[in-house]
Image: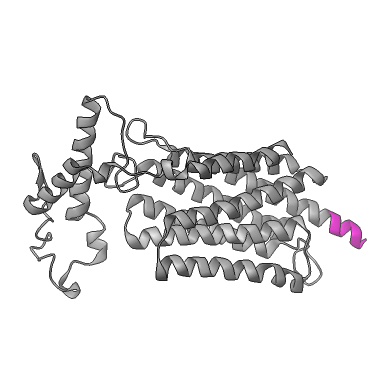
Amino acid sequence: MAICRRLPLFLLAFFCFLGLLSASDGDAHPIYIACVEQCEKTGCVGDICFQHCNLTSERKSVNDPWYLQEPLYIKWKKWDCLSGCRYQCMLVREEDREKSGDRPVKYHGKWPLQRAFGIEEPVAVALSALNLAVQFQGWVSFFILVNYKLSLRPNRQTYYEYTGLWHIYGTLSMNFLFWSAVYHSRDVEVTEKLHYSSGAAVLGFSLIVAILRTFNVRSEATRVMVAAPLIAFVTTHILYLNCYQFDYGLNMKVCVTMGVAQVLIWGVWAGVSNHPSRLKVWLVALGDGLIIFFQYYDFPPYWGFLDAHAVWHAIAVPVSYIWWSFIHDDSEHRTAALIKKAK
């Protein structure tokens, strides 16, 4: 219970310093702005030049109509003029700042991370892919467990009442991690919206599952009454982000609120229940608390690759493994209890 009592205090401090932590000063500096403008005109930053600043690889003008432009799958393999200029000017600017003894600053909301194999954030991409593999393994093993290893009802349905909910959760989680890997490999408008929209969706559904499982809601009518308002809220939020205004600050507050709510719900439930795997719930609650912490306690990247964002992606990998382990245990525990009750 101590974690649940202290977590809101940490979050209150984070929200107070949110404005300070989200500052992005590098792209506002006159030297950087002049560098990017000059690069877009000449196509070069120092000795490094970008062939796509005025023409595409097939010598097509970038100002041609869309039907004369290169296909998306070709564009995806290389950086356009603006992206290349921004990246190279950022490296030059940060090299000058390092020589002057200054700390790194953010550019367009992001720390100056090194690219690898054309990937913007290689560590975050690798960890998202690893977490996706963990989620897939956890979901497949859960499917095999409830359908082939545990006893079934006479109508061939599972005894475990939350099987369908966890299948949806697994699908939404894998969808989010897929788009997370895509977004961190290439940050463009469409990948950004898909990443944050899928994140809000999985958080909203996780909150629904938390309420239904901890309060042991088994009636279909009651489940609909609980889920409908939350589904409507999350759907409205996603439509607002995609169709009206993409507000990163608002999305962060909504997602953190939903995340904290389910952490507290699961934490309190683990404290008052006699579930045999309640320790795993505490470990997941602690891991989620650390993830929230590193969402706000931002720091410059080490060695040009490892920043706070990559750290919380690393924490999420064992958290996902432990969480699916709890889901397996919960299905076995509930199935055994229901079979015993039926006898």
Eyeballing the image, is 177 above or below 165? above
Q: How is the image coloured?
A: one colour
Is residue 341 found inside the magenta-colored segment of the image? yes
Residue at the location (29% across, 39% down)? 114
Q: Nearer the viewer, residue 198 or 229?
A: 229
Counting from the top left corner in percent of width and height, residue 57 is at: 12, 59
Q: Who is closer to the viewer here, 31 or 338?
A: 31
Q: Is 235 on the left or on the right of 68, as rendered?
A: right
Locate the C terminus by quadrant: bottom right
Q: Quadrant of residue 81?
A: bottom left
In the rendered view, does 261 fall on the left or right side of 125? Answer: right
Please state the horizontal and vertical placement of residue 147, each as a whole percent of the image. Answer: 70, 61
Overall secondary structure of the magenta stretch?
A: helix
Is residue 152 among the parts visible in the rendering?
yes
Query: Magenta span covers which residues?
Result: 337-343
Is residue 276 at least partly visible in the picture? no
Residue farthest along the right direction in this orientation: 343
Q: Give the residue drawn at x 73%, y 39%.
A: 279
Q: Residue at x 31, y 30 (%)?
A: 103
Left/right of residue 122 with respect to residue 101 in the rendered view:
right
- Residue 135 in picture, x, y percent from top left: 55, 51
Determine the residue positioned at 77% across, 58% down: 215
**Percent x, y for residue 220?**
75, 72
Total marks shown come to: 0
Reply yes or no: does residue 99 show up in magenta: no
Name the quadrant of the N terminus.
top right
Nearer to the camera, 66 or 30: 30
